[in-house]
Image: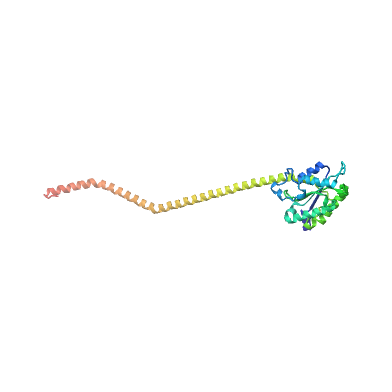
């Protein structure tokens, strides 16, 4: 049971979003964004070369020319839908696990499936695989032309039931082949529009930049800490060496004392004995002098020379 719960929480959903484009000006703006003609803050310029754009639809003029060719000279109603923009991707965690080859094939299959649902391949006026953003995704624009006229209702229907059906069929027909499943049908979770999707993406990029900044700061602090630890380790080692040197010096002094203090004490005692004997000699010296004088007088009195 626990394994099933874990499986239910896995992030491997197929993502399919639709957005109606309701004016030529909005159509031009969407094309400018998709073709990277205008500045795109959430895109990485260094990865822009990896985007996949067909040569026949690689400029706004070419895309609008395709649109005009499909709609002809018909008078377009004021409330008409000029285009249906579609975003196809998957849960970021799952997309990152897919190889580039698998991603390319997933988007290729998705475009074929969308063409069948949105009036045919001829209705494609733009498609780009964006690999320069956080999560790779396909962004396509279809002109909702049916029998030569713009008729989005015929393709998307006028109720939410049609959108639910499209998302279910897409997950079953395309997503399942790549390990992507449908989200919980009729769940209370509100699906993002394409505009909300990009708004959320723009909020993610500054957060990623802030996280990278914090990582660099942490790495710097860690480097300082390692240097401090290393410095302290050297200081501790120097203190140990100094302590060892002092211990060796103390032992040497102890040995010197053991070897020499006895001799010093013996010499001191000898000096003290010498001083005592000299004092005694000084005491008897006068008597010895008198005795010597007396002996000399006795010898002279007897007529002998000393």
Q: Quadrant of the N terminus?
A: bottom right
- Residue at 52 percent across and 51 percent down: it is 237
In front: 301, or 259?
A: 259
Percent coordinates x, y for residue 69 in the rendering: 83, 47
In front: 47, or 261?
A: 47
Drawn side of residue 54 relative to residue 74, left or right: left
In front: 194, or 187?
A: 194
Q: Quadrant of residue 104?
A: bottom right
* Colouring used for the render: rainbow
Percent coordinates x, y for residue 213 in the rendering: 66, 45
Residue 185 visible somewhere in the drawing: no
In the image, is residue 75 above or below residue 240? above
Drawn side of residue 22 relative to residue 260, left or right: right
Drawn side of residue 181 relative to residue 213, left or right: right
Residue 290 visible somewhere in the drawing: yes
Percent coordinates x, y for residue 256 in the rendering: 40, 52
Numbered marks: total: 0
Percent coordinates x, y for residue 79 in the rendering: 87, 42
- Residue at 53 percent across and 49 percent down: it is 234
């Amino acid at each position: 049971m626990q394994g099933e719960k874990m499986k239910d929480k896995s992030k491997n959903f197929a993502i399919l979003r639709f957005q109606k484009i309701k004016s030529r000006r909005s159509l031009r703006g969407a094309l400018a964004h998709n073709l990277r003609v205008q500045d795109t803050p959430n895109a990485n310029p260094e990865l822009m070369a990896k985007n996949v754009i067909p040569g026949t639809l690689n400029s706004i003029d070419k895309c609008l020319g395709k649109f005009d060719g499909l709609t002809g000279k018909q008078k377009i109603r004021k409330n008409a839908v000029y285009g249906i923009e579609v975003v196809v991707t998957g849960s970021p965690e799952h997309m990152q696990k897919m190889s580039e080859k698998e991603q390319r094939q997933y988007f290729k299959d998705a475009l074929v499936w969308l063409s069948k649902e949105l009036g045919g391949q001829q209705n494609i006026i733009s498609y780009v695989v964006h690999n320069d953003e956080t999560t790779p995704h396909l962004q396509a624009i279809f002109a909702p032309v049916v029998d030569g006229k713009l008729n989005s209702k015929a393709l998307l229907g006028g109720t939410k039931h049609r959108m639910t059906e499209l998302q279910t069929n897409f997950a079953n027909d395309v997503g399942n082949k790549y390990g992507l499943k449908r989200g919980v049908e009729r769940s209370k979770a509100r699906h993002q529009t394409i505009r909300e999707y990009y708004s959320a993406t723009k909020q993610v990029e500054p957060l990623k930049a802030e996280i990278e900044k914090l990582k660099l700061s942490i790495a710097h602090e860690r480097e300082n800490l390692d240097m401090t630890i290393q410095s302290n380790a050297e200081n501790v080692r120097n203190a140990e060496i100094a302590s060892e040197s002092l211990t060796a010096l103390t032992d040497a002094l102890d040995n010197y004392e053991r070897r020499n203090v006895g001799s010093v004490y013996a010499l001191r005692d000898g000096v003290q004995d010498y001083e005592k004997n000299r004092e005694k000699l000084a005491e008897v010296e006068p008597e010895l002098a008198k005795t010597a004088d007396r002996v000399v007088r006795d010898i002279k009195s007897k007529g002998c020379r000393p």
